[in-house]
Amino acid sequence: MTTSEPRPQNPVVEAIDDESGRHLTTVDGWRRFIALAPTPPDLLGSSARRHLSKTEEDSYDAARLEHHARLLVVATSTVRHTVTCGRRLVLLNRHAISARRGLIVSGPAGTGKTISITQLGRSHELTDRARHPHSTDRIPVVYITVPPAATARMVAAEFGRFLGLPVRNRLNITDIIEAVVGVLTDTRCGLILVDELHNISLASRSGAEVADTLKYFSERIPATFVYAGIDIEHSDLLSGTRGAQIAGRFTLITTEPFPYGPEWQGLVATLEQTLLLHDHKPGTLTGLDRYLHHRTGGMIGALSHQIRGAAIDAILTGTEEITKQSLEAIPLDHTAETSRPRTTSGNRR
């Protein structure tokens, strides 16, 4: 890792802490997500580190910890494909009067579905801002998640909550829908992202009503709808009369664990380049890429968690490097831990 010896700087940890309370499911939180482009702190050389006071050293380490705690977005083939398909649909739908096409991103947990659709949303919002640089009243993108055991009113309320509309108990679902449709039409919304779609089951009455409500929104709001959820293609959401309507209008993109190969090796190399550790030997992680694939089952979420967790441990313990042993010490999610083979593989490194 190349180091530099600039003058020590005190990072603004307070601003980072303030971000933690923001959520993508509010218009303010979404805008902060779009605007967020944190600059990694400089990795100081040994001479500069020796001249840090205790307060400066604590602040410097805190900035590095925050850097590794952030989820790094890597432009994987899945992210690129989702953004390309989504932008194409937005353009095709721009002048459609009805029967607008949508997109479903489906796959196992931890395969990058949410990252893919939020990066699509980011791309659309930045494009819209570039096309309308002097407009301040536009809301190009809406992002909501479907609550567990959702009802139609709950989903309508999620739209209202994103927009900051007062969703009081005395308001019925029609009142909420009309308010949401009015605001999103006036603010020229062009893309609506609905995450956690697997929380809907068409086998239940409430689930069917949620599906109908989303369909009604799509008919009233001139926007492209993008859904994401776990294994949607194997659920009842694409079966029956309602499911057939969804399947007939939505393109399906499936996300999967990455096979061991050039793209996986590139992911590991990219993550290694982001490390800010003083004693880490460049190439250590790329030399362990097959082991990392074996350990994580090819799940990008597990890979990111393992490497960032090991980097945080390296700073907290003062070892300042990642080794195979320190990677082994990071517990992963249950799926990753139980899906990998239990036998010792001869090709593990």
Image (cartoon, grey):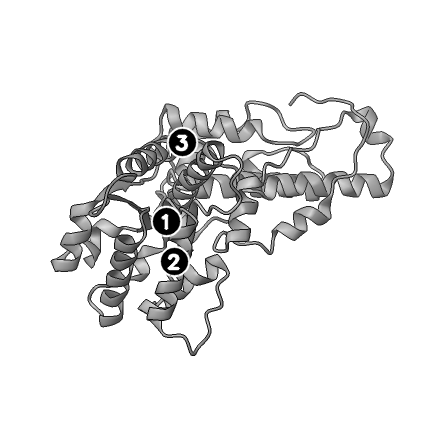
Point 22% across, 49% down: residue = 233
Classed neighbour count for the residue bearing mark 3: other residues with Cα under 10 Å, few (<14), some (14–19), many (≥20): some
Rendered location of residue 139, percent (x, y): 46, 47
Amino acid type shown at disc 1? Ile
Quarter of the image for residue 177 reads bottom left
Q: Which residue is mark 1?
A: 192
Q: CA distance from mark 3 to mark 2?
A: 37 Å
Q: Give whichever of 75, 110 is nearer the camera.
A: 75
Extreme residue in the left direction: 241
Which numbered tag is attached to residue 76?
3
Q: Give whichever of 167, 288 is nearer the camera.
A: 167
Point 21% across, 57% down: residue = 237
Q: Which residue is mark 2?
A: 182
Dot placed on the residue nearer the N-terminal end, 3 or 2:
3
Mark 3 lies on a secondary structure that is loop
Dot placed on the residue nearer the N-terminal end, 1 or 2:
2
Dot placed on the residue nearer the N-terminal end, 3 or 1:
3
Q: CA distance from mark 1 to mark 2?
A: 15 Å
Q: Give whichever of 268, 22 is nearer the camera.
A: 22
Q: Is residue 181 left or right of residue 305?
A: left
